[in-house]
Amino acid sequence: MTTISPTQEQQVLDQVPKQLYIGGEWVDGSEGTLGVEDPSTGDTLCEVADASAEDATAALDAAVEAGPEFAKHPPRERGEILRRAFDAITARSDELALLMTLEMGKPIAESKAEIAYGAEFLRWYSEQAVRIDGRYAVSPNGQGRLLTMQQPVGPCLLITPWNFPLAMGTRKIGPAIAAGCTMVVKPAQQTPLSMLMLAKILEEAGLPGGVLNLITASSASKTTGPVISDPRLRKLSFTGSTEIGRKLMEQSSENLLRLSMELGGNAPFIVFEDADLDAAVEGALIAKMRNIGEACTAANRFHVAAPVAEQFAERMAEKMGSMRVGRGTEDGVEVGPLIDDKQRTKVQELVDNAVGGEGIQRRGRSDRRGQ
């Protein structure tokens, strides 16, 4: 890989639509614009539309209006739309990877891996669109027949995180389109560009206007709150922190929304006394540093058997220390910047605790017996 030039970066940014996508039209946001920062420098990459609560409601209006017609849309054609979008993403993987790196920070190689991973959701659901089965059975009393049909649930609100800007979108949008549902999509404020490009690609693939409506906003609560409380919404899908997920679940209870949530965790990495330490270190490096460590599946705690703890720590430190840190577009970079000041502050607190000894616990065999 060679280092990307500023001209190439600007060319990719220029291709991204910067407005809201509502009812098949690209429109300005009522709140003006918001800046999208380069996490490696803090500089503004570009400005995108900033939606208001009224814009979000208009997006839901469009989804509701398009719902009945799209529910009747031939499953084969819904699948073909997804397949065309998959082909387009695959063909444009280089530019989409660069766009993702610019807004999120991860190295180009990791962005390319996410593009491939995210596109696969569209291919998978393009094939599932024609496999929406029902059930036919004889009633228990033998007096009739029981027919079960699967139908679209209706308008959905899809909220995606900043750490996987494209894959978390395709993962939610793909099944919604395959099932015949319309939707309002709200990407994270930090990383709206990949989702805006995905909306453009789906539009070019033939997705009818109003099926996918996309709002970008500086305030998630002000825009999604009214949508969640609207009785016309039927489902909420959210990927993000447990804290926010808990609040969204509470809000969703009023209208008994169907919920799909993928929330945060505190994953442990365990190394036993008889482990192959070289393999353990390689696995730990992947578990901890995939996606710059910014993933809900990243290892947050290491439990290492006392007899091999020192060796593991030394080898892990050596491997970690050899990784090149820098801007994700630069040649040879393995670790990009953290997404924003909030995350940098959080990591600094963890480092300070570890240096102060608060995050390190070492116990001998006798200590472990009583736990």
Image (cartoon, grey):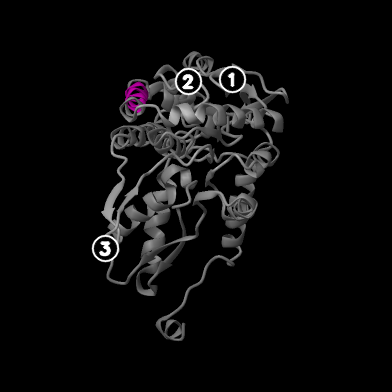
Image depth: mark 3 or mark 2 in front = 2
The kind of secondary structure element at disc 1 is loop
Residue 89 forms part of the magenta stretch: yes
Q: Which mark is residue 138?
A: none
Q: Please give the residue where the numbered disc 2 appears in the rendered image.
A: 200
Between marks 3 and 2, how big is the CA–CA gap? 48 Å
Residue at x 47%, y 32% (from the top left corner)? 328
Instruction: Provide the residue designation for mark 3.
Output: 276
Q: Amino acid at mark 2?
A: Lys
Q: Nearer the viewer, mark 1 or mark 3?
A: 1
| Front residue of 210 and 349 | 210
Of the pair 275 and 216, the residue shown nearer to us: 216
Q: Is residue 317 magenta?
A: no
Q: Residues within 10 Å of mark 3 (few under 14, many from 20)?
A: few
Name the kind of residue labelled 1 in the image. Answer: Lys
Extent of the magenta region: 80-90
Give the CA distance from mark 1 to mark 3. Answer: 50 Å
User: Label 1: few (<14), some or many (≥20) within 10 Å?
Assistant: many
Labelled pair 1, 3 in contact (Cβ < 8 Å): no
Instruction: Please tell me in which quadrant of the rendered image residue 352 appears.
Output: bottom right
Question: Which residue is denoted by mark 1 in the rendering?
Answer: 18
The answer to whether the residue labelled 3 contacts the one labelled 2, judged by CB atoms less than 8 Å apart, is no
Give the CA distance from mark 1 to mark 2. 11 Å
Mark 3 or 2 closer to N-term?
Answer: 2
